[in-house]
Amino acid sequence: MQNLPEQNKNNEPAELVRRVLDEARKQGATAAEADIGTGTGFSVTVRWGEIEKVEHERDKGLSITVYMGQRKGSASTSDFSDKSLHETIKAACAIAHYASEDAAAGLVDAGLMAKTIPDLDLHHPWPITPEQAIELAIKCEDIARNYDQRINNSDSAVVSTYAGTHAYGNTNGFAGGWLWSSHTIDCTVIAEQAGSMQRDGWYSKTRDYNDLQTINAIGEEAARRTINKLGAKKLTTRNVPVIFEAPVAAGLFSAFITAISGGSLYRRASFLLDKIGEPVFSKQIHIHEQPHLKKALGSAAFDNDGVATRARDIVKGGILQGYVLSGYSARKLGLQTTGNAGGVHNLIIEPGKETLNDLIKQMNTGLLITDMIGFGVNQVTGDYSRGASGFWIENSEIQFPVEEITVAGNLKDMYQHIVATGNDVDRRGNILTGSVLIENMTVAGE
């Protein structure tokens, strides 16, 4: 056992892992793995300067998976008493006893486990009281509401903070974990002009509360984005170049990751089957995974199987270099895990040198998308169709906001026709990308 985070002087997560794994062995499991999460935090919501909601969170949970040969059973509990842990493991064993055999079931080889747990600087508890958070939220909302007289309503301002523990261990002798935190300030307002209303907002999310944007910046950006949507028009159907602004561009690459993930591949339910070594993006696109970035929201020392994460290229020069595999999906495909049980960790789309304004100038005439509605991706065919709103561009200048349109294409073609990626990287999630200019898409309107 190694490097489990200390929740208290008795290192409770490490002790819990040891206890449940030992008990699973006693109850007949040939192998077992346990995952523990604990945490505390709160969020406050204000609207029109009044407290709307204060929520305190205190969470703890344990999941145990046992294997009896090639049969698997899982159970979970939030009660860490000896009796509850015994019954939870008993339930997992009972499920495994009656489960069908699965040749791909089992722990990942011990040699692939993380040997060390680097400090990724993920734990920065925010010493803020609910009263201070309420005051901060009210100020943020006031900044947004006072930005322009056309802002006549608020959909709320929220301040939230959370800090917790993640721990994992298995009967291959591995145990590890880390402490983590996450903090958010969010503000959304409503504006009205000539009987038309628009709603928009902005938020900041970080591991370290010191890295949050100021409430002035958040409130003003929420207001600016809302005001800019006033006077929105519809478009007639046309084929034009399209820019996906950074906050919505991440969705393009989320669909890509799903398509090259083991679950989609072994089910043969992907539009990117058997594409290793082939061009799947335009040649200037470089996509890589950086799991060990300090303070990043997607950082992790090991995946959900305990496998060490590592930096790697996924797309280089537009060519697909590798898949996204867990231990289970790798076995199903006859391949080796890539350390991605649970998904990717800090997927980085290498940015270009251009700002968003540079991309707009390069596009000259087309659509800038700032909001997407619904989910319209067929992972088997790659067909893409989603509701959108944004701005119509002509002569490299914003002409007017647009709404109630649909953008459509096929992701295989869209990826191949990415012209450029901007340097305005959105770092508020696990997929880090700037704005993306695509050569041509169908925009369906009136």
Image: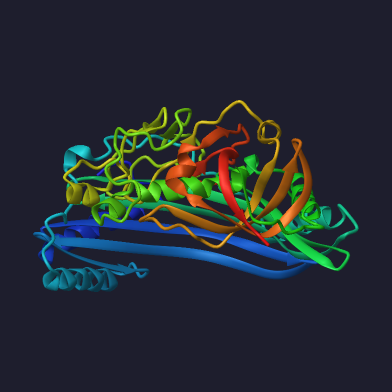
Q: Quadrant of residue 318?
A: top left
Task: Note whether 373 is above or below 77 in the view shown.
Answer: above
| Residue 32 appears in view | yes
**Quadrant position of the C terminus in the picture:** bottom right
Is 125 placed above or below 105 here? above
What is the quadrant of residue 131 in the picture? bottom right
Q: Residue at x 21, y 41 (%)?
A: 336
- Residue 186 x/y as whole percent: 67, 55
Q: How is the image coloured?
A: rainbow
Left/right of residue 307 with respect to residue 44 in the rendered view: left
* Image side of residue 196 versus residue 178, left or right: right
What residue appears at the point 63 percent right and 40 percent down from the top-left corner? 211
Seen from the viewer's position, the closer of residues 378 and 199 is 378
Q: Quadrant of residue 112?
A: top left
Residue 428 in sight = no
Nearer-the-camera pick, 65 or 315? 315
Q: Quadrant of the N terminus?
A: top left
Q: In this rendering, would 134 be left or right of 319?
A: right
Indicate the position of residue 338 as horizontal and vertical percent values: 28, 40
Foreground: 13 or 399?
Answer: 399
Q: Residue at x 19, y 57 (%)?
A: 32
Q: Residue furthest right?
A: 149
Residue 363 in the image, given as x and y percentages of width and height = 66, 35
Instruction: Looking at the picture, tell me which residue is in the foreground, 54 or 264.
Output: 264
Residue at 45%, 43% in the rendered image: 413
Count of residue discs: 0
Counting from the top left corner in percent of width and height, residue 243 is at 62, 42
